[in-house]
Image (tube, rainbow, N blue to C red):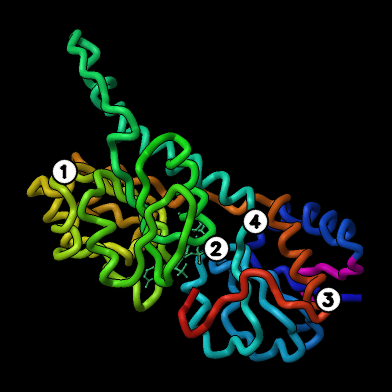
Amino acid sequence: MITVQYAARSDRWESQEAPLRDAFAAAGLEVDLRRDHAPETVDYVIYAPNGDLQDFTPYTRCKAVLSLWAGVEKIANNQTLTMPLCRMVDPGLTAGMVEWVCGHVLRYHLDIDRSIHTQDRWQPRVPPLAEERPVTVLGLGALGQACANMLATLGFPVTGWSRSPKSLEGISCRHGSEGLQQALRDAEIVVLLLPDTAATENTLNRETLAMLPRGARLINPGRGPLIDDDALLAALDSGQIGHATLDVFRIEPLPADHPYWAHPNVTVTPHIAAETRSITAARVIAENIRRGEASEPFLHQVDRNLGY
Ligand code: NDP
Ligand code: OXD
């Protein structure tokens, strides 16, 4: 019997327990899934950063910690974590992110706000075609690639930026610090899908925001620290950035007195761009436990040195 501790928030247990049990059964795994195993008896921990578990020291025989979240910045530097850490790459979460990103890109591209706010006038203004609107996606991982591919399918000329070099059909790929300027200089819409690491903090700052064409729009479903907030507010006020849609923040919930709430050129969404979906995510967890038991390499293992 494999012992699995569910250490994510207890209010998610209700929606996740049955899908996990089904996925374990479908994978042929005999699992004792509980929330109250003695730590020293646990083979795998299912983790979420908003749960209570912080100290992994008592989990002496644990073979892996399996995160239900894609972003692992709250656990990647945890010194008590000595076992492999796997992040979530879930087809359901990815589909949600693609829908959310494409929806917000199309809001900007089609100037949907103008239609909503000019209901009293007949003032035709035809938007350009997608092929005339360069979009850049910062981060070409599981989520960035899926969004870049869908945006390219819609017709946008898409540039992507990553740490290591990539070659992706239909996407102009740039990498490294020298590639960032090339990725930004023509971008009318920028989507941030980078992880929060020491190397990505303030990727968009005063200097890099100034590389964008005037009036560029930003969409950040990545993490708050990717953007220097003061630099963004200054760029919004000067018109260098035309509008920003922000889903993630350095402090969440976003404090009531934060200037983003009241800024006329900012849309705040409350960290809802994409959520782990119970059924598809349970299959990923089960597959990783199957791999662990078969001594096969885990899927989506975090590189603790890189922090993602
Ligand atoms: P991945 O780890 O699959 O991809 C990360 C991408 O970022 C990779 O392309 C990586 O480059 C690139 N990258 C990392 N560091 C750097 C750097 N220093 N310079 C340039 N590029 C860099 O992550 P996912 O796509 O799965 O997720 C991205 C982020 O989305 C998550 O970390 C999380 O913060 C956020 N997220 C937000 C959600 C929401 O609801 N708002 C939901 C889920 C995730 P390379 O390919 O070379 O390694
Ligand atoms: C995640 C998130 O990282 O929801 O999964 O932000």
| Distance in Å between CA atoms under marks 1 and 4 | 42 Å
| Distance in Å between CA atoms under marks 2 and 1 | 31 Å
Give percent across and percent down for residue 231: 16, 61
User: Mark 3 sits on what residue?
Assistant: 3
- Residue 265 as seen in the image, left or right of residue 58: left
User: Mark 4 sits on what residue?
Assistant: 11
Q: Residues within 10 Å of mark 4 (few under 14, many from 20)?
A: few
Helix, strand or loop at disc 1? loop
Q: Earlier in the sequence, mark 2 or mark 1?
A: 2
Q: Earlier in the sequence, mark 2 or mark 4?
A: 4
Report the amino acid beneath label 2: Ala
Report the amino acid beneath label 1: Gly
18 to 3, vertically: above or below: above
Helix, strand or loop at disc 2? loop
Q: Earlier in the sequence, mark 1 or mark 4?
A: 4
Q: Quadrant of the N terminus?
A: bottom right
User: Mark 2 sits on what residue?
Assistant: 70
- The magenta stretch spans which residues? 29-37
Whether residues under marks 3 and 2 lie with C-beta atoms below 8 angstroms apart, the answer is no
Q: Nearer the viewer, mark 2 or mark 1?
A: 1
- Residue 175 figure quarter: bottom left
Helix, strand or loop at disc 4? helix
Q: Earlier in the sequence, mark 4 or mark 3?
A: 3
Q: Residue at x 18, y 42 (%)?
A: 242
Q: Nearer the viewer, mark 3 or mark 2?
A: 2
276 to 201, vertically: above or below: above
User: Mark 1 sits on what residue?
Assistant: 215
Give percent across and percent down for residue 136: 33, 51
Helix, strand or loop at disc 3? strand
Question: Nearest the camera: 10 or 89?
Answer: 89
Whether residues under marks 1 and 4 lie with C-beta atoms below 8 angstroms apart, the answer is no
Q: Is mark 2 within 8 Å of ligand 1?
A: yes
